[in-house]
Amino acid sequence: MRPTVLAALFLACAPALAHAQAGPQPAGTWLTPGGDSQIRISRCGAGYCGTIAKVMAGETKDVNNPDASLRGRSLIGVALTRDMRPAGEGWEGSLYNFRDGKTYSGKLAMKGPNVLELSGCVLGGLICKKQMWTRVD
C-alpha cells in the first residue's frame, strides 16, 4: 500500500517538479533596466517572491504607496513580486510598482540564464509593459 501512495504523490507533483527543473530559474539578484535598483528573487512556498535589495538612484522611500502610513518606509525589503507560480513558460503572480504605488498582475519569464523578462498588466492582460532585468549574481 505504501508504494502505491508514494507513486500517486509523485505523479501528482511531477508536472510542478518538471517545471521547476526545466531551464534557468529566476532566483538571484537582478538589476533593473535603468540601473537604479537591484531586486532579489527567491523561493517562497511553491513560487517566487522578489524584494528590493538595493536602491542606487532615485527615491529611497515608498512615497507612492496607497497606504499613507507606509509612505515613509524604506524601499529596501519591500516586496515587488508575490507568489509567482509556474504558468506556461514562466511564472505568474502580482507585481507592486513602487513608482506609482499600484499592484498589477504580472509575469516572469527567463530569456536566457542572465536575462529575466518582467511584464505587468492591467485590464486582464490587455495592456502590458515589459522590462528586461539582468542578473547581478
Image (cartoon, helix red, strand yellow):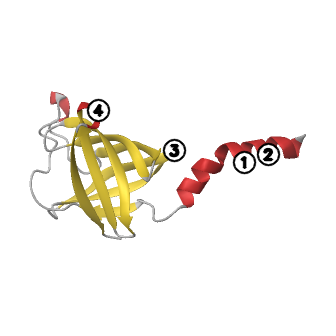
Which mark is nearer the camera, 4 or 2? 4
Using the numbered discs, state the Cα–Cα distance from disc 2 to disc 3 in whole angstroms: 21 Å
Given the current orientation, which residue lies at the most extreme front position?
126
The first of marks 2 and 3 along the sequence is 2
Label 2 with label 1: CB-CB less than 8 Å: yes
- Quarter of the view holding residue 34: bottom left
Q: Secondary structure at mark 3?
A: loop
Quadrant including the N terminus: top right
Q: Is residue 66 above or below residue 19?
A: above
Task: Report crowding for label 4: few under 14, some 14 to 19, many 20 or more residues within 10 A (C-alpha).
Answer: few
Q: Is residue 100 left or right of residue 109?
A: left
Label 4 with label 1: CB-CB less than 8 Å: no
| Marker disc for residue 10 | 1
Q: Is residue 38 left or right of residue 34?
A: right
Using the numbered discs, state the Cα–Cα distance from disc 1 to disc 3 in whole angstroms: 18 Å
* In front of the other: 135 or 56: 135
Label 2 with label 3: CB-CB less than 8 Å: no
User: Callout 2, which amino acid?
Assistant: Leu
Using the numbered discs, state the Cα–Cα distance from disc 2 to disc 1 in whole angstroms: 6 Å
Q: Secondary structure at mark 2?
A: helix
User: Callout 3, which amino acid?
Assistant: Gly
Using the numbered discs, state the Cα–Cα distance from disc 4 to disc 3 in whole angstroms: 25 Å
The first of marks 4 and 3 along the sequence is 3
Which mark is nearer the camera, 2 or 3? 2
Q: Which residue is mark 4?
A: 124
